[in-house]
Image (cartoon, helix red, strand yellow):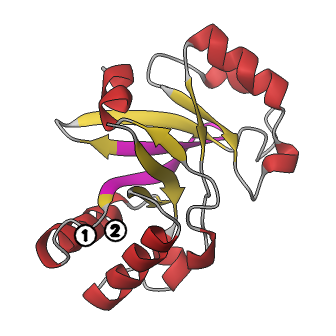
């Protein structure tokens, strides 16, 4: 079943609270639902624990109102990579905002551990070469993703994907 998912958000930064509590998680969920989203990838910089805590609160206290995919944004050389921790201990990785920071030949960093690439990101659209992204996605069989990279709650869901979580899992296997 296809879901509306924003797979690249920084909710800790957006709320200025790096240990989520129920009130903060309610704000995150309300914001996502107002945008019509079914779920979020919660992908703090170098911090996967935050996403797991948000997911656990949503599951335990909010009756699973929103699908939460824990993740983190990390560096792979000069590239920013979003790592999503999917059901079944499956790890899905995608290149975040290719073009920022500027990398002369980011194709050199694409290997079998990379499953997707962002082609839309409201903060970095101007720095991204859509033709190059499309050609690399085709060449390396990468799924193309549009995400908000939200650093403010109001940005959650500006861009999102209509995708089945099973498709993400299948690409990462």
In the picture, the quarter occupied by the C terminus is: top left
74 in relation to 128, above or below: below
Residue 108 place in picture, x, y as percent: 67, 19
In the image, 141: left or right of 42? right
Left or right: residue 127 versus residue 89 is right
Residue in the foreground of this view, choosing between 164 and 87: 164
Q: Is residue 147 above or below residue 99?
A: below
The magenta stretch is 68-84
Q: Which mark is residue 53?
A: 1
Q: Is residue 17 visible?
A: yes
Please name the residue shown 49% across and 73% down the image: 34
Q: Quadrant of residue 97?
A: top right
Residue 104 appearing in the image: no
The alpha-carbon separation of the residues under discs 1 and 2 comes to 5 Å
Extreme-right residue of the structure: 126
Residue 74 is inside the magenta segment? yes
Task: Give neighbour class at mark 1: few <14, some 14-19, many 20+ (Cα, 10 Å).
Answer: some
Q: Residue at x 61, y 77 (%)?
A: 154
Determine the image quadrant of residue 170.
top left
Residue at 73% across, 22% down: 134
Residue position marked by numbered label 2 in the rendering: 50
Picture residue at 52% right of the left edge, 66% below the top: 10
Q: Are marks 1 and 2 in contact (CB under 8 Å)?
A: yes
Which of the two residues, 78 or 152, is positioned nearer the viewer here?
152
Question: How many numbered marks have been drawn onto this rendered protein structure?
Answer: 2
Considering depth in this image, is 146 or 100 the residue closer to the camera?
146
Q: Secondary structure at mark 1?
A: helix
Residue 146: where, in percent of width, then height? Answer: 62, 44
Main SS of the magenta part reads strand
Residue at the extreme top of the image, as rendered: 139
């Amino acid at each position: 079943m296809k879901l509306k998912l924003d797979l690249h958000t920084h909710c800790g930064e957006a709320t200025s609270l790096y240990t989520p509590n129920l009130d903060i998680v309610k704000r995150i969920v309300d914001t996502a639902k107002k945008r019509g989203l079914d779920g979020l990838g919660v992908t703090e910089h170098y911090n996967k624990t935050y996403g797991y805590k948000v997911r656990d609160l949503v599951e335990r206290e909010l009756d699973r109102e929103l699908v939460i995919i824990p993740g983190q944004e990390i560096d792979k050389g000069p590239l920013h990579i979003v790592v999503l921790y999917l059901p079944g201990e499956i790890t899905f990785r995608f290149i975040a905002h290719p073009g920022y920071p500027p990398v002369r030949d980011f194709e050199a960093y694409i290997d079998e551990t990379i499953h997707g690439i962002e082609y839309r990101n409201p903060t970095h659209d101007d720095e991204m070469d859509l033709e190059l992204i499309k050609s690399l996605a085709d060449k390396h069989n990468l799924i193309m993703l549009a995400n908000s990279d939200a650093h403010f709650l109001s940005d959650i869901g500006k861009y999102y994907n209509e995708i089945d979580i099973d498709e993400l899992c299948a690409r990462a296997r």
